[in-house]
Image: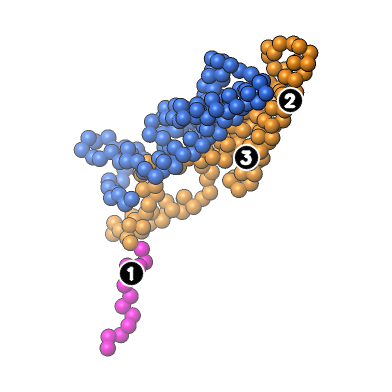
Amino acid sequence: VFCLVLRRRPSPHAPAMEPPSEAADVDFSEVFAGDKIAFNNSKLNYCRVFVAILSGCVAGVLGLTGLSGFVAFFATALLLSAGLYVKVGCQPKPFFKTPSDIWFDGVMQAMLSYILFWTLFYDIVHIY
Amino acid sequence: STRLRSRSVCVSRARQERQLCPPPGSALLPSHMGVGRRFYKLAVAASVLLLAHVTVCAIQHREYLKAMQQPFTYPPVEIVLQCALVLVLGAWGVLGLQANFVPIRTTTHLAKQTVDSLDGGPEWVHFNTRPLR
């Protein structure tokens, strides 16, 4: 993707990544690269599903049932989000569209994997 | 001329970027990329093996409780600790291996472009070295 770069007059105080404050100028800080968004989302999804599988196995082994199981899932998802937040250096803005994406994106998709492995390991340990 | 000045500015910026600086996201392990990946893979493998171990432990504990005819209330402390270790190791390992994000805004990598790359490159340089016949 080749975008035409508008070189403004060089000002000594403005770094290249700041959006221009004038309304007439195009705000290039919000021009996203689609392939990089997809790359970030796939990495985030991989992390979420992996930790959901692990926490599902752990919940099954510990014998959690009902609401406590779902509470455990959301607790581990929150811990993973905190770990991701630390990994990006507490600045999710360059890597995601909104800063809250790193906390909530992909959690619901990982829940299905969590439930699968939770029931599987509960059956293995406590029923059979 | 302005063209020469912008080229010299871009050269100095490129020289600055050539210095090695670790990305801000490598905070999980202080060493650089090549050596550190082995530890993350080891952590993930260890967490999976520990999960298998704790499953077997829990199955044996359940069988013991069935033999002693005691009800199952809470798992014992060592199983809980092993499960916590599985989660911590697995999460740390997968974060180190897979959570390498790239910046998504085009201004980030367009800001690193120099005016030399906009020229079109040396393919468009014409040489006029042959004598006219």
Q: Are marks 3 and 1 on the same chain?
A: yes
Pointer 1: what residue? B125
- Residue B40 is marked as 3
The quarter of the picture where the C terminus of chain A appears is top right
Closer to the eye: label 3 or 2: 2
The quarter of the picture where residue B31 lies is: top right
Residue B86 at x, y = what percent?
65, 29
- Mark in front: 3 vs 1: 3
Chain B rendered in what hue?
Answer: orange
Q: Residue at x 53, y 19 (%)?
A: A70
Label 3 – label 2 distance at C-alpha? 25 Å
**Does the magenta segment cover residue B124?**
yes
- Which residue bears the numbered disc 2? B57
Majority secondary structure of the magenta segment?
A: loop
Q: Secondary structure at mark 3?
A: helix
In percent of width and height, residue B97 lies at 57, 40
From the top left corner, tell me how far across and down residue B89 is, in percent: 64, 32
Q: Hey, what amino acid is under mark 1?
A: Val
Q: Residue at x 40, y 40 (%)?
A: A37
Question: Is the residue marked by circle 1 packed among few (<14), some (14-19), or many (20+) residues within 10 Å?
Answer: few
The chain carrying label 2 is B
Nearest to N terminus: mark 3 or mark 2 = 3
**Residue lying at 31% horizontally and 78% vertically, measured from the top left:** B128
Are the numbered discs 3 and 2 placed on the same chain, yes or no? yes
Q: Colour of chain A?
A: blue
Q: Chain of mark 1?
A: B
Tell me the distance, in whole angstroms, between the alpha carbons under discs 3 and 1.
Answer: 48 Å
Magenta residues (range): B121-133
Extreme residue in the bottom direction: B133
Give a yes or no on whether discs 1 and 2 share a subunit: yes
Quadrant housing residue A41? top left
